[in-house]
Image: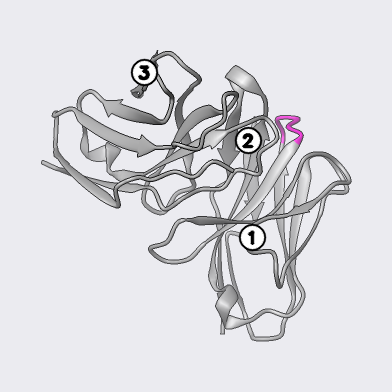
Amino acid sequence: NAGVTQTPKFRVLKTGQSMTLLCAQDMNHEYMYWYRQDPGMGLRLIHYSVGEGTTAKGEVPDGYNVSRLKKQNFLLGLESAAPSQTSVYFCASRLAGGSTDTQYFGPGTRLTVL
Amino acid sequence: DAKTTQPNSMESNEEEPVHLPCNHSTISGTDYIHWYRQLPSQGPEYVIHGLTSNVNNRMASLAIAEDRKSSTLILHRATLRDAAVYYCIPISSTDKLIFGTGTRLQVFP
């Protein structure tokens, strides 16, 4: 049981390049989330999904796209990277509902855009 | 989404109890109160959650006010490994989970 994994762990991009971050979970959770965390700041929600084939916008969705084609995977795409997207990206999955509700986070992807 | 207010930072000495407060005056009747923490250079991790009554687990205790407008996370004996940012989050089953800025806890030897 690996929990939540993120690929890659580190990446350096040039302005204008594109990339996709992969999040995978093996806990059969319906809910998945993408957050970004800038240095010294809290987490901000980018996009989230409440089930396979669904996505929704969070607090800071501009410049990002997501897809949830399979229940276990949640992809975050940057079509044209900008220096303002330099951040640490965290993915999470969630066992939602009532007394057992718990969110599990991946180790993060550190992205630098030059 | 319910709004939360937490102190920006708190300090404690090792092996002393720590009480981390959170105000959530707009919480709805069905929202659970969750606490997560983020250790340096790691993703957040679950600490504890509750609905109305106080809760205990091996990591911490959660004291919830009778009117549910505030709660307190209690670390009974702080250790250096408890130095982290602690987030209080009211959650309903369909929420999109917004983290606030949390409380940065410093623990001194």
Q: Residues within 10 Å of mark 2 (few under 14, many from 20)?
A: some
Q: Which mark is residue B58?
A: 3
Q: Secondary structure at mark 3?
A: loop
Kind of residue at disc 1: Pro
Q: Chain of mark 3?
A: B
The mark lying in front, picked from 1 and 3, is 3
Residue under numbered circle 2 = A3
Q: Secondary structure at mark 1?
A: loop
The quadrant of the rendering that contains the C terminus of chain B is top left
Tell me which corner region of the image, top left, top right, bottom left or bottom right, holds residue B25.
Answer: top left
Q: Which residue does the image show at 45% across and 49% down from the upper left? A: B42
Residue B101, x across and y down, in percent: 41, 53
Q: Which residue does the image show at 76% across and 56% down from the upper left? A: A75
Tell me which corner region of the image, top left, top right, bottom left or bottom right, holds residue B77.
Answer: top left
B40 vs B81: above or below: below
Q: Chain of mark 1?
A: A
Q: Which residue does the image show at 41% across and 22% down from the upper left? A: B67
Stretch in magenta = A26-30
Question: Contact, CB < 8 Å: mark 1 with mark 2?
Answer: no
The mark lying in front, picked from 2 and 3, is 3
Residue B24, magenta (yes or no) = no
Q: Which mark is residue A8?
A: 1
Residue B28, x across and y down, in percent: 57, 30
Q: Chain of mark 2?
A: A
Question: Contact, CB < 8 Å: mark 1 with mark 3?
Answer: no
Name the one closer to the observer, B62 or B84: B62
Residue B18, x across and y down, in percent: 21, 32
Give the CA separation, mark 2 to mark 3. 21 Å
From the image, give the main secondary structure of the stretch colored magenta.
Answer: loop
Kind of residue at disc 2: Gly
Name the one closer to the observer, A83 or B86: B86
